[in-house]
């Protein structure tokens, strides 16, 4: 694997507590991002959604090329990058390091 997959975004304890409370009281929690109406019945569902939701600050990490640390929004993007940019670099690097 020459690239890193994004993880889930990090949430503060405060925000998590608020969401858990909402689920407890209303049995649902809404995506906090403006303009997004997604509603979930569990905090884990909301968390998973926020990793994909592009309407707010809770952005998940990006796909990152481990060779040059460049970031990509999609897995196909980083794969294409590695294949096109780094396909010959490997041999080049191992020659140089010896
Ligand atoms: Zn959303
Ligand atoms: Zn790269």
Image: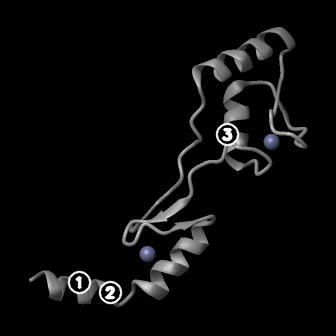
Residue 45 position, x and y percent, is 72, 33
Say which mark, if any, is on residue 48: 3
Left or right of 94 in this view: 22: right
Residue matched to label 1:
93
Q: Position of residue 83 (x, y in %)?
A: 47, 83
Asked which secondary structure carries label 1, the reply is helix
In this picture the colour scheme is one colour
Splitting the image into 4 quarters, where does residue 73 fall? bottom right
| In contact (CB < 8 Å): disc 3 and disc 2 | no
Report the quarter where the C terminus lies: bottom left
> In terms of image quadrants, where is residue 29?
top right
Q: Which mark is residue 89?
A: 2
- Cβ atoms under marks 1 and 2 closer than 8 Å: yes
- Mark 2 residue crowding within 10 angstroms, few (<14) / some (14–19) / many (20+): few
Local crowd at mark 3 within 10 Å, few (<14), some, or many (≥20)? few
Q: Secondary structure at mark 2?
A: helix
Which comes before the other along the chain, label 3 or label 2?
A: 3
- Where's residue 85, x and y in %? 45, 86
Horizontal placement of 45 versus 41: left or right?
A: left
Decide which of 9, 28 is in the foreground and name it.
9
Work out how far the residue at label 1 is from the one at label 2, CA to CA, in angstroms: 6 Å
Identify the residue shown where x is 54% and y is 80%: 80
Whichever of callouts 3 and 1 sits on the residue coming sooner in the sequence is 3
* Total number of numbered discs in the rendering: 3
């Amino acid at each position: 694997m020459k690239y890193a997959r994004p993880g889930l975004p990090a949430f503060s304890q405060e925000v998590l507590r608020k969401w858990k409370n909402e689920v407890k009281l209303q049995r649902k929690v809404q995506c906090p991002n403006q303009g997004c109406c997604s509603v979930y019945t569990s905090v884990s569902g909301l968390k998973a959604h926020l990793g994909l939701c592009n309407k707010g600050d809770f952005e998940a990490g990006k796909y990152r090329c481990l060779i040059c640390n460049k970031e990509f929004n999609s897995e196909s993007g980083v794969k294409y990058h590695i294949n096109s940019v780094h396909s010959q670099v490997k041999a080049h690097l191992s020659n140089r390091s010896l």
